[in-house]
Image (cartoon, grey):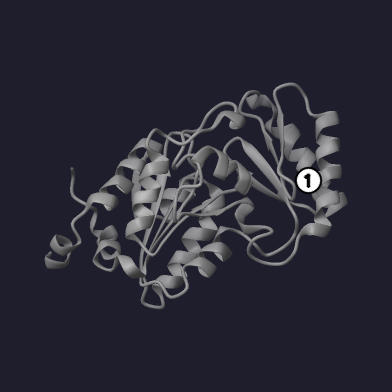
Amino acid sequence: MGALPDVLVPLIQDPGHSALCLDFDGTLAAIVADPVGARPLPGVPELLARLAARFALVAVISGRPVDFLARVLGAPAGVTLVGLYGLGQIGPDVGPWRPVIAAAVAEAEAEAPPGVYVEPKGVTVTLHWRQAPEMGPWVTAFAARQERERGLRPYPGRLSLELRPPVEVDKGTVVRSLAEGMRAVAVFGDDLGDLPAFDAAAELATHGVAVARVAVVDDESAPEVAARADLTVQGAPAAVALLELLAQADGATAARN
C-alpha cells in the first residue's frame, strides 16, 4: 500500500469529524459510451460501506437520479446518496418544473438526430452526443432554445449537456449542507459539474476546515477541473485506489507524522 497524500491525512486524524463527498461517473465508475450501462468499478459498494464505518460522512453526489445510484451501488450501509445535484433533496421544491422538463424531453426525443441520447431524469434532462461527436452543435443549439423559450439552464458536461430548472442548487450547495460541523472534507470529482463542489470546499477552508479537492482526470477532462484541485489522479481506478488508501490508512501513524 502506498503512502496517503498529505492533503488527505487530516481526514484519518479526525475521522469522527471528516466527510468524503464523491462524484459517481468518472470517479467511482468509468466513463462509458452508453450512460445507461455505467456501473461502479469492482468492489466500490463494499469500499464505500467500509469508508462510511470509519468517517462521519460518506456521500455520493451525482447528476444521476438517486434511484439509479441506489440500484447500481446497492445502497451501501451508512452512505448518503444525493441525486440530481440535490434537486428535490436539498434546496427549494422543483416539482412545478417537472412538466416543463417533460415538454423539453418530448421535444428532444422528437427532434434529436441519430446518435444523440436523451436521458430524462424527472426534474432534469441530459443530452449525450458521445456516440455522435459531430452532433455537439445541434445539442448546444437545442439547449439554447430551451433556455430562451422555457427558462431552463444549460450545464455542459463530458460530451453532454444537461438542462435544469433555474434554481440555486448544485453540488456546491449540497457540500455546504452536508459538511456542516466537519473539520476535514475531501471532494472527489472529474467534470465541470464538480467545480461548484470544489468552490464550496475552498470556502470551507477559509473557516478553518482541512480541505482536499481531488480531480479525477483523463485525456477528455476540462482543464478547469485540475486547475482548481489540490490533488490530481488519473481516472476512476486511481480514484478508487486512493479511497482504498483512506480506508486502510493508520490514523495513529499519520498523527505522529
Instruction: Give coordinates of residue 113: x percent, y percent.
Output: 77, 24
Residue nearer the viewer, 68 or 118: 68
**In terms of image quadrants, where is residue 257?**
bottom left
The residue that appears at 26% across and 48% down in the rendered structure is: 245
Instruction: Give coordinates of residue 33: x percent, y percent.
Output: 57, 26
Q: Is residue 10 left or right of residue 100?
A: left
Determine crowd level at label 1: few under 14, some 14-19, many 20+ residues with C-alpha closer than 10 A.
some
Question: Which quadrant does the N terminus fall into?
Answer: top left
Q: Is residue 168 left or right of residue 111?
A: left
Question: Residue tagged by mark 1?
Answer: 144
Which residue sits furthest front?
77
Which residue sits furthest bottom?
207
The residue that appears at 77% across and 39% down in the rendered structure is: 141
Which residue sits furthest top?
114
Instruction: Give coordinates of residue 42: x percent, y percent.
Output: 39, 33
Instruction: Give coordinates of residue 98: x percent, y percent.
Output: 81, 51
How many numbered marks appear? 1
Residue nearer the viewer, 141 or 102: 102
The residue that appears at 35% across and 57% down in the rendered structure is: 53
The residue that appears at 54% across and 49% down in the rendered structure is: 192
Mark 1 residue type? Ala
Whether residue 27 is situated above or below residue 78 in the rendered picture = above
Whether residue 107 is situated above or below residue 84 in the rendered picture = above
Q: Is residue 193 left or right of residue 134?
A: left
Residue nearer the viewer, 255 or 16: 16
**Secondary structure of the residue carrying numbered label 1:** helix
